[in-house]
Each structure stands twice: as C-alpha cells, then as structure tokens.
Image: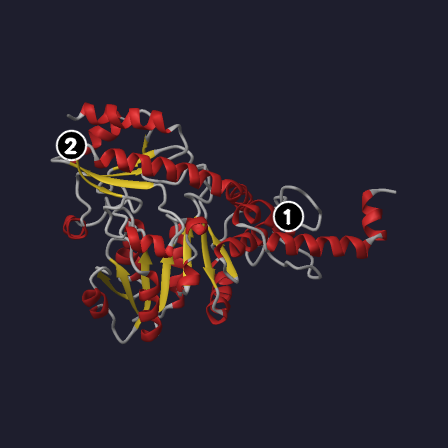
Amino acid sequence: MCIRDRRRVHGILILEMDKAKSEVISSAGFSTRAIHMERAEDSAGTLVFPINTSVSFEESGNFTYARQGNPTRDALEKVMCSLEKAKHSFVLPSGNGAGSFITHLLRPGDHILACQDMYGGLIGYFDNLATPVLNYSLTYANFADKAQFMAGFKENTRFVWLESPTNPLLNIYDIREIAKVCKEKKAYLVFDNTFYTPYLLNPLELGVDIVIHSGTKYIGGHSDIMIGFVCVNDEDIYKKLKELYELYGGCPSPFECYLALRGLKTLPVRMKRAQRNALKLAQMLEKSPQIEKVFYPGLPSHEGYELNKKQARGTGAIVSFKLKGADVDTSVKFCLALHLFCFAGSLGGVEGLVCVPTQFTHGALPPEFKKKVGVTDNLVRISLGIEDYEDIEKDITNALKAIS
C-alpha cells in the first residue's frame, strides 16, 4: 500500500497527529516555531514548504488568484504572525512598500506625526510623495522631548510613526508610554521593527497598532531578497488592510516568500552572533581616542540603556559612531580602508556592512534636516555580521590607523 493510500485509509489518525503537531509547534519557543511553524501549515508533510507558482486556483479550494493569496505566501504570513505575536500579517515587496501600503488607510488631509530621526528612505517617501501627491500633512518631532512630541499632535493626526532604536542614531523611546498617548489621541501607532526583529521585540504587546518590517534585512538575512511585512492585531485595521491589499497589487513572488521562510529559520542564531559582535565592537570603540561618541543601546553609557532592557530582549547588531574631527572625506576613507565590511547602504546580512549615513540612508535629505537630527558627516553606521570577532576588531583597528 502506498503512503498516499495509508493516509487515506488512516485519515482520522493522520488528522489527529497533524492537529497534535500543530498544537505542540504553536506553543513552542521562538527558535522552534521559526523552524517548524511552516511544517504545521503543510498538509503534504514536507520538511520545506514548497514554492507554489500557480497564478490561478480552482474555485473550490482555499485560493482563487495569486494577487489575493498564494500557499507559499500564506505560510510565510502565518509564521510571521506566530513570531511577531500578531493575529494577521501581510507580505509586501519591500520595507518601503510596507510603509507606503499602510498609508492608504489615510485620507487626503490626514496628519502623520513621525519621529524625526527615522529611516531616510521613508522620510523621502513622506516628503516627495505622501505629502505633495497624496495630500497628507506631516510633522517631524523629537519624541524624546515630551513637550515637543505632544505639541506635534493635531486634531486630524491619524498616524504616529515610530522607530526604536532609530536609524541611524539608535535612540530608544518608551513604546508603552507613546502607545498610551496615541490611544488617548485616537491615533494609530505605527512601529518599524526592522532593527530588532520579532526575536528581540514584539511591539504589539506594548500597545502598538501596526508593525512593519523590512524583511530584506535580518529576516531574509543573506542580502539576496527584497521583502516587507505588516503585522496587526486589531480586526478593524485588518479588514481595511485586507481589502486594500487585494487592490494594491503589491505582493512578492513565491520564491521571495520561500527565501524569507528559510531566513527565519536561522534568525535567532544569526541575531545572537551578530549582536555579540556588536557589543564587543561598541565596547572597543568607546575606548578609542579617535572616536567622539558611540551609539549602541547595549552600552551603559547609552541614554536608553535601562529603558531598552525593560521593553526589548536584546540590543541588536547595529553600531553607529562619530569619528573625532572627521569630515565626509575622512569618513569615507575609513569605510574604504575596511576589508571585511562592504561599503553599502543596507544591513542585516550575514556579512558586515558599513556606510556614511549622510551619503547613503539620508543622502537625499536637505543638509539642514540632517544637521537638526544629528546625522553628520563624521557619523558611521556599521551592521555587524557573523564573522569571527577577532577579524572584525583587527579590520576596524587597521582602518582607524589609516585615517590617523
């Protein structure tokens, strides 16, 4: 008797086993769920969820058309829900795609209050498309200054946009307190969890309404895909986003979804290793006479050190620092003197990356804005990979010597 026949003959037993397996996996720890959750969604019993490339499906099944839903994408959404502790999730083609997608919940004239030291790519979207074309109004504020934060609200504020840690200065904000204010003001709190990932932080548990990710970074983890996520718990928000998603047309291919599922399986081990490297490097740089200041929430000297311990399970793998007395040419020279770090504007891969934010993430922004938020020409941002730390320290030391 073939396996297929045995499953049919012993159908009740197999169904009971599948149900028990699903219950065990759903209640397991983060790493276990990251590895096995996709298996709980696959009735075929495969170890790796298959790439389903079909565009159309028979009407009698669970899917009808790939823009509305796809088995591989559906499996990824369910895994992300489990890890982010969300009821619903959506997969988008990129992190910026996820951010721009949720703004379609707004109407012309609605107001967005955003933290001023956020990712430059989304600032570019807000300034060049959301406000002049879609007619949203926008205010940037220093969320560390409570008076300035509160003054930023208007009667038509619908979104409050937050990162913690921020990109690239790694400021830490009190997510619970900000979420409380947003509830009082009847504004949705949007949180970009790209830097910490669900492994280190679950913002929905702290009162956030909408979580977005650039899965291109740590979730993919190998610098070979572009993908984004939106995660929510509120049913009203979900229903609105579900309708928008089917109309929006911004869905990644099944292959990207497969690669993201693969990346999630190793997220915990990659994050632990990269975070360990980041802490060691930050401690080393803090002792260097060539460094003006180090920005890393794992250092006791960081202003958000204690707050971060209360709301997150780690301190991430990004280290930013200011070279003492350096101009942009010196900062670039330092980056180019590195041999193990690629001079590039992304982050979150297994390999180390380095950039000068004024020339990369915030390159298109006005000089006065960069100066206001503290993104200066002597600021360098490093994304730590999983290389041997001894090699990393040697590479950084040699690059510092090159500019001394």
- 155 versus 348 height, above or below: below
Q: Residue 289, labelled with which disc?
A: 2
Q: Quadrant of the C terminus?
A: top left
Q: Nearer the viewer, residue 351 or 94?
A: 351
- 191 versus 332 height, above or below: below
Whether residue 383 can be seen here:
no
- 274 versus 156 height, above or below: above
- Which of the two discs, 1 and 2, labels the residue nearer the N terminus? 1
Q: Amino acid at mark 2?
A: Pro
Q: Decide: marks 1, 2 in contact (CB < 8 A)?
A: no
Residue under label 1, please give it: 39
Between circles 1 and 2, the one closer to the viewer is 2
Q: Nearer the viewer, residue 327 or 385?
A: 385
Q: In terms of secondary structure, where does tag 1 sit?
A: helix
Q: CA distance from mark 1 to mark 2?
A: 52 Å
Residue sitting farthest toward the left: 325
Q: Amino acid at mark 1?
A: Arg
Q: Is residue 91 left or right of residue 142?
A: right
Relative image position of residue 41 (x, y in whole percent): 64, 52
Residue at the spot 71% in from the left edge and 47% down from the top edge: 44
* Image quarter of residue 387: top left
Relative image position of residue 75 (x, y in whole percent): 59, 52
Q: Is residue 82 left or right of residue 97?
A: right
Relative image position of residue 293 (x, y in whole percent): 19, 41
Residue at the spot 58% in from the left edge and 57% down from the top edge: 69
